[in-house]
Amino acid sequence: MTSQMSRSPGRCRTVARLHREESGQMSVLVLGMLVILLLMVSVVVGATTVHLESRRLLSAADGAASAASNGAEMAGRQSMSAAEVGARAREYLETSGAYGRFDGLQVRRVWTSDGGASAHVELSSAAEMPLVSTVVPDAVTVTVDSHSRVTTER
């Protein structure tokens, strides 16, 4: 019993010394985990922003393609040219205020298919990231395309 009692004060000093040497280790671990968590949140918020921007842009492209095919229907024609599609798409985007809602909105390409019966519109816009970090760029270019077909009832 006496031998255990004599070793006890030395053991206490060793434990106390080890405790002092490890002081602050948990703070470094918590800080590292916090940085990783913030980077993950930044990536998720960026991906969500790009997805929502692509949905909004697709809606504008749908409207532009639909406006082009509706213009041909109103004229009583079953086909249209790429120049007509481009003009009607740009007119729709202007009147709907899409140029003000999207950063850097561009009509990248317009074309027709099926002998001019289908109008295709491709738009692009910049999606600005709300949280900029070394992992996520400050802006991403989003490109969508939509098509619409002229339908006439006989």
Image (spheres, rainbow, N blue to C red):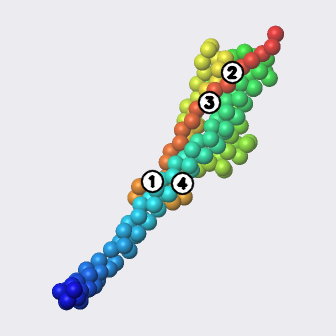
Residue 38 placement, left or right of 72: left
Q: Secondary structure at mark 4?
A: helix
Instruction: Name the residue carrying label 4.
Output: 45
**Residue 24: quarter of image:** bottom left
Q: How many marks?
A: 4
Q: Nearer the viewer, mark 2 or mark 4?
A: 4
Residue 20 screen position, x and y as percent: 29, 83
Residue 60 placement, left or right of 39: right
Residue 99 screen position, x and y as percent: 65, 46
Q: Nearer the viewer, residue 90 or 123?
A: 123
Give the number of the disc on residue 137. 1
The residue drawn where x is 47% and y is 62% is: 38
* Of callouts 2 and 4, the N-terminal one: 4
Q: CA gap, disc 4 to disc 1?
A: 12 Å
Q: Quadrant of the C terminus?
A: top right
Q: Secondary structure at mark 2?
A: strand
Instruction: Name the residue carrying label 2.
Output: 149
